């Protein structure tokens, strides 16, 4: 099974996998074969690989034991700061996330920023915009409706993701493998991470659209993971490296409605983009609860209204 793909809405896409137990097993034996590695990356002392691996394994154990935490990922793409942020609860098998894209041409977007939110509790998925008439509503995808969105985006049936609550930002840190310390600093570890998970943090919809061309082998690309008192702190990665690694292994960038020239322009723009993900709040309480009944909109009703060219009936909370 390919690691980590699930859609949360027609415009919100999530990715992830693994419960706390499964994360441990996947860390030892990734679901895809590790083969390709990009050539770029920081200077690293390979003699420190074993010690760096121990430090990373200890940080991973802290990550699972703490169970809860928060992340924030940022990247400057075409002079716009795209941001993904959220919280998770490994033991509770739930997460909450929001993706902010400035400059999006979307009616009702706040201050020119297109913001979509998502929530996953076990395998129950919710999503929706933070703007417009439905800002107070959550689209309810249930536990199976997400498969329909996947098929709409990809045009094909996809393997079900049993752990959609495991965010891609969590994946890139928890599955990272150490190469050694950087400049003798034992809090700075040169690592390799999953290329598809890295790109999916901010560009999930494009990655989902490109699913059919993703290589079967797990593609690893270089990154730098900083620790703070033995815990994950900051991960820096070139998204250009991630895209190049996947394209070299056969992936074709596909965005619904985009031309080949537009796909090429996207790749060129991404070439020098660095994504920085910070982790904090380990062990702090997180409030991730199912939306109330008056906040819910059934996805089936939404799709039916769209097919008739009508506006969907808003949730009761939006009418207050």
Image (cartoon, rainbow, N blue to C red):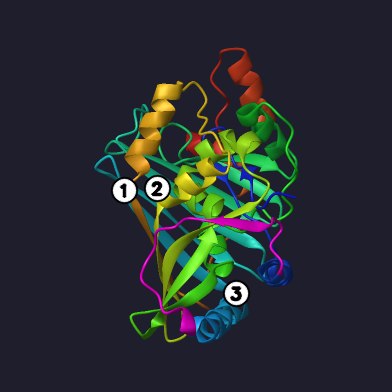
Q: What residue is shown at x 61% (from left), y 30% (from top)?
A: 153
Disc 1: which residue? 272
Q: Are marks 2 and 3 in contact (CB under 8 Å)?
A: no
Query: How far apart are the two marked residues, 1 and 3, measured between alpha carbons?
Result: 34 Å
Q: Nearer the viewer, residue 167 or 241?
A: 241
Q: Is 40 contained in the magenta span?
A: yes
What residue did someone put label 2 on? 240
* Mark 1–mark 2 CB contact (< 8 Å): yes
Residue that lies at the very extreme toward the top in this rendered image = 308
- Residue 173, percent from left and from top: 52, 67
Of residue 258 and residue 153, the one placed in the foreground of this image is 258
From the image, tell me which residue sits under label 3: 67
Per the rendered image, the range of residues in magenta is 29-47
Q: Secondary structure at mark 1?
A: loop
Q: Which comes before the other along the chain, label 2 or label 3?
A: 3
**x and y, in percent, of residue 241 in the image:** 42, 51
Is 228 placed above or below 113 here? below
Residue 12 visible, this angle: no
Can see residue 138? yes
Task: Name the mark nearer the viewer: 1 or 3.
Answer: 1
Q: Where 59 falls versus 210 (above or below)?
A: below
Report crowding for label 1: few under 14, some 14 to 19, many 20 or more residues within 10 A (C-alpha).
some
Q: Quadrant of residue 45?
A: bottom left
Numbered label attached to residue 307: none
In which quadrant of the rendered view does residue 184 lie?
bottom left
Q: How many marks?
A: 3
Q: CA distance from mark 2 to mark 3?
A: 31 Å
Query: Which one is closest to the eye, mark 2 or mark 3?
Result: 2
Residue 3, percent from left and from top = 67, 53
């Amino acid at each position: 099974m390919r690691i980590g793909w699930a859609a949360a809405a027609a415009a919100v896409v999530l990715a992830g996998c693994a419960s706390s137990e499964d994360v441990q097993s996947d860390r030892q034996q990734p679901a895809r074969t590790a083969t390709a590695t990009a050539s770029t990356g920081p200077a690293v002392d390979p003699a420190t690989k074993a010690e760096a691996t121990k430090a990373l394994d200890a940080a991973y154990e802290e990550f699972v034991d703490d169970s809860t935490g928060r992340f924030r990922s940022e990247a400057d793409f075409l002079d716009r700061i795209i941001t993904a942020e959220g919280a998770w609860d490994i033991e509770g098998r739930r997460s909450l996330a929001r993706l902010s894209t400035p400059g999006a041409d979307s009616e009702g977007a706040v201050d020119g920023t297109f913001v979509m939110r998502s929530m996953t509790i076990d395998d129950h998925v919710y999503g929706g915009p933070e703007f417009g008439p439905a800002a107070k509503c959550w689209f309810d995808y249930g536990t199976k409706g997400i498969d329909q969105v996947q098929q709409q985006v990809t045009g094909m049936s996809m393997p079900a993701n049993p752990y959609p609550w495991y965010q891609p930002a969590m994946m890139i840190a928890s599955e990272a493998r150490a190469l050694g310390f950087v400049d003798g600093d034992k809090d700075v570890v040169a690592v390799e991470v999953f290329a598809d998970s890295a790109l999916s943090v901010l560009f999930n919809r494009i990655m989902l659209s490109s699913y059919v061309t993703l290589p079967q082998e797990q593609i690893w690309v270089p990154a730098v993971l900083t620790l703070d008192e033995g815990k994950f702190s900051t991960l820096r990665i070139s998204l250009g490296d991630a895209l190049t690694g996947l394209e070299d292994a056969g992936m074709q960038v596909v965005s619904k409605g985009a031309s080949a020239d537009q796909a090429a322009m996207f790749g060129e723009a991404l070439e020098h983009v660095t994504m920085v993900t910070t982790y904090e709040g380990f062990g702090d309480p997180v409030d991730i609860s199912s939306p109330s009944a008056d906040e819910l909109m059934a996805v089936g009703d939404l799709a039916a209204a769209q097919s008739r060219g009508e506006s969907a009936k808003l949730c009761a909370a939006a009418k207050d």
